């Protein structure tokens, strides 16, 4: 049975808004997402992608057309990611910030500048989707909370991440930026804190490189953990550049 069979769709009257809505049953029993009828197209595409021959471009189009969280997004939906089936490096962050939401370009901010310096890559290399895939845990800007941006919404990973990863067969290294990505990919192998997980990077490399967020707000963390730049980053740069040199 294809993965898409785990979704069941039924149209039901929406007594509040006066139009039809769609209830999508997700893989976890009893969980539903209430959608407006205008996003049904994305789910029709999603359910048609069970075949191994399905177009990766069609999947990306469905992701970029997704409006599942529209009611919860202060700036509206704008899923931001890049990917190609030939990519060997995957960058998994948290969710786009407001500046990235406006530009539509992933990591188009000071955090991205620091991340590229950590990786030892140019902008051209970083934004070459044929070599670097960029898929955050949440694809849209989630809004502000106390002390910073809100966490990435769960719907992105629940609905799309598995299908995207299944179409990235050549990925050899994944950069896990922040605790949300580390929790999802490392599971029980993750340490109790982000600092401990990053400190144990040799346990995960080269398949995974756990990283702190490169935000300027994280500069105090970097100053307290100077071994991160002396130990992990030189190894990361060598590995990234080795993968980029391969075709």
Image: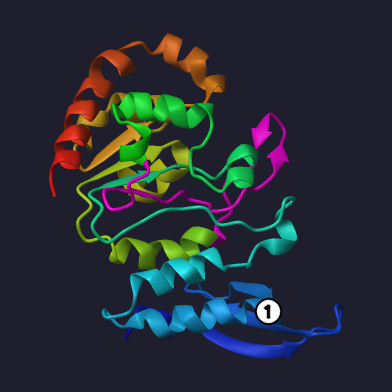
Q: Residue at x 48, y 81 (%)?
A: 45
Is residue 131 within the magenta segment?
yes
Secondary structure mainly formed by the magenta segment: loop
Residue 160 versus residue 83 in the image, above or below: below
Q: Is residue 128 visible?
A: yes
The residue wearing badge 1 is: 38
Which one is in front, 54 or 26?
Answer: 54
Residue 7 in picture, x, y percent from top left? 49, 81
Would you say 130 lies left or right of 151 here? Answer: left
Residue 99 versus residue 26 in the image, above or below: above
Q: Residue at x 34, y 31 (%)?
A: 197
Q: Residue at x 28, y 53 (%)?
A: 130
Would you say 211 lies left or right of 131 here? Answer: right
Residue 180 in picture, x, y percent from top left? 47, 43
Which one is in front, 30 or 1?
Answer: 1
Residue 107 in picture, x, y percent from top left? 48, 38
Would you say 155 lies left or right of 160 here? Answer: right
What segment is highlighted magenta in the picture?
A: 127-155
């Amino acid at each position: 049975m294809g993965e898409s069979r785990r979704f069941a769709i039924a149209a039901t009257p929406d007594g509040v808004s006066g139009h039809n809505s769609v209830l999508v049953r997700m893989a976890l029993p009893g969980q539903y997402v209430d959608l407006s009828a205008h996003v049904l197209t994305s789910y029709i595409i999603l359910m048609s992608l069970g075949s191994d021959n399905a177009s990766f471009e069609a999947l990306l189009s469905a992701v970029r057309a997704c409006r599942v969280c529209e009611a919860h997004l202060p700036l509206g939906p704008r899923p931001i990611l890049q990917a190609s089936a030939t990519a060997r490096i995957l960058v998994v962050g948290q969710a786009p910030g407001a500046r990235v939401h406006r530009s539509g370009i992933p990591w188009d901010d000071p955090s991205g500048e620091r991340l590229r310096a950590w990786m030892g890559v140019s902008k051209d290399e970083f934004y070459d989707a044929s070599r670097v895939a960029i898929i955050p845990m949440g694809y849209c800007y989630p809004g502000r909370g106390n002390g910073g941006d809100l966490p990435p919404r769960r719907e992105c990973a629940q609905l799309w991440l598995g299908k995207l990863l299944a179409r990235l067969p050549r990925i050899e290294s994944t950069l896990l930026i922040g605790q949300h990505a580390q929790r999802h990919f490392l599971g029980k192998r993750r340490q109790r804190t982000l600092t401990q997980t990053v400190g144990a990077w040799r346990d995960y490399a080269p398949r995974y490189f756990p990283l702190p967020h490169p935000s300027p707000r994280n500069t105090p963390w970097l100053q307290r953990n100077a071994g991160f730049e002396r130990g992990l980053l030189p190894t990361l740069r060598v590995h990234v550049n080795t993968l980029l040199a391969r075709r």
